[in-house]
Image: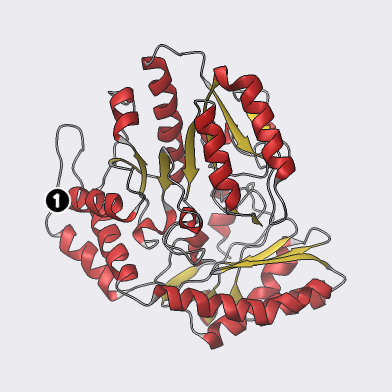
Amino acid sequence: MNTFDQAHIWHPYAKIPNEVSTHVVKSAEGVYLNLENDKRVVDGMSSWWSAIHGYNHPTLNQAITTQLGKMSHVMFGGLTHDPAIALAKTLIEITPENLTKVFFTDSGSVAVEAALKMALQYWHNKGQSDKHKFVTIRGGYHGDTFGAMSVCDPDNGMHHLFSSVLPKHYFVKSPSMEPMDDALQDLESTLKQHSSSIAAMILEPVVQGAGGMRLYNPQYLTKAKALCEQHDVLFILDEIATGFGRTGELFALEYVEVEPDILCLGKALTGGYMSLAATLTTDKISQGVGTLMHGPTFMANPLACSVANASIELLLSSNWQDNIADIEAVLHSELSTLRQHEKVADVRILGAIGVVELTEEMDMEIVQNLLIENGVWLRPYGKLLYTMPPFIINKQELLLITKAIKAVIETL
């Protein structure tokens, strides 16, 4: 632990001084983080789900090095560059056919902000400014900026402190893996009653991330999209956490081939190397929006675009689907039996996602230290002990993670 860090630097969702120890990372290679005092741990979090190829990958290193020799950054206002053009072409090619326009941002939260602003400007320009609300399912998480916070779960999310100053939107029942009648009826009722004021629906497809790590029936997406079309409401999918193979499909929307009006991407877009995100939309929406009133300073940063191009090419040229299937099989075989444990409320697995929900909240300091003692880095929160490992992880490394999870449950 670094004493200056502890006394002066804020960490995510923490106070100063941090109540939970922070650990100094000296270097990283493959799936390993090399901590101070010569401690080496398997990263089961992919640096918050982004480092899908692991660390210090020679192909990604080379992409940044090559671009650095040309230019590290140039403003995107009035200028463009080849890495951004190449990346936009690739994103249009690998996402649903209706998505033809790309707006680059510098983080996932801002990609959501851009999506919400697109929807608002679209209806404003059509003379329907009353359509300024959003609808979403409970249990969602879309980021930490103000617009994104307003569509996160209002009660159990991380942003209830700001509820009095956030715009008020509509929250409907979350679907589950079971029959979805109640959730769909709640959505339909809300749309019937309020569609004149709703600009768009936004949700994470199939997997809800930081709002609770819940899985739900992909068929909900198809039916929700149909209801939105019926009531003249745009459909936004947030694939920031689920995109680029994490669920076993390249994008989670591919489970049912649904076409959103707007799509948000981020996290694994650059293989975890740099912060970059993108918001894609259709010809119809872009024409309706016209001039989108948004423009981050580091929009379409050339270094980030270059490494994103290399990361996507590396992913698509690999046996990523087999790798994800292998990870999923190990997670099933090692974690599924924990459902019978008295301290476990549920186990949820999809693709390279393994979630163990406990019956009671964990002591973060105790659990974090126990995991490190077992040679593993995970970042549990609340009642959730979960892993989203890099796709390059081998079976022995993955078994270290599952063994550590079991050790935590037995020790608590």
At a point 34% along the width and 75% down the height, the residue shown is 318
Badge 1 is on which residue?
Answer: 82
Q: Quadrant of the C terminus?
A: bottom right
Q: Give the residue furthest to the top.
A: 127
Q: Position of residue 112 (x, y in %)?
A: 46, 38
Q: Quadrant of the N terminus?
A: bottom right
Residue 4 image offset from top left, x and y in percent:
54, 56
At a point 83% along the width and 74% down the height, the residue shown is 340
Q: Is residue 394 visible?
A: yes
Q: Amino acid at mark 1?
A: Asp
- Within 10 Å of the Cα at label 1, are there few (<14), some (14-19), or many (20+) other Cα atoms? few
Q: Position of residue 95 (x, y in %)?
A: 35, 52
Q: Secondary structure at mark 1?
A: helix
In which quarter of the view is residue 90 placed? bottom left
Q: How many marks?
A: 1
Instruction: Please say if 205 is above or below 260.
Output: below
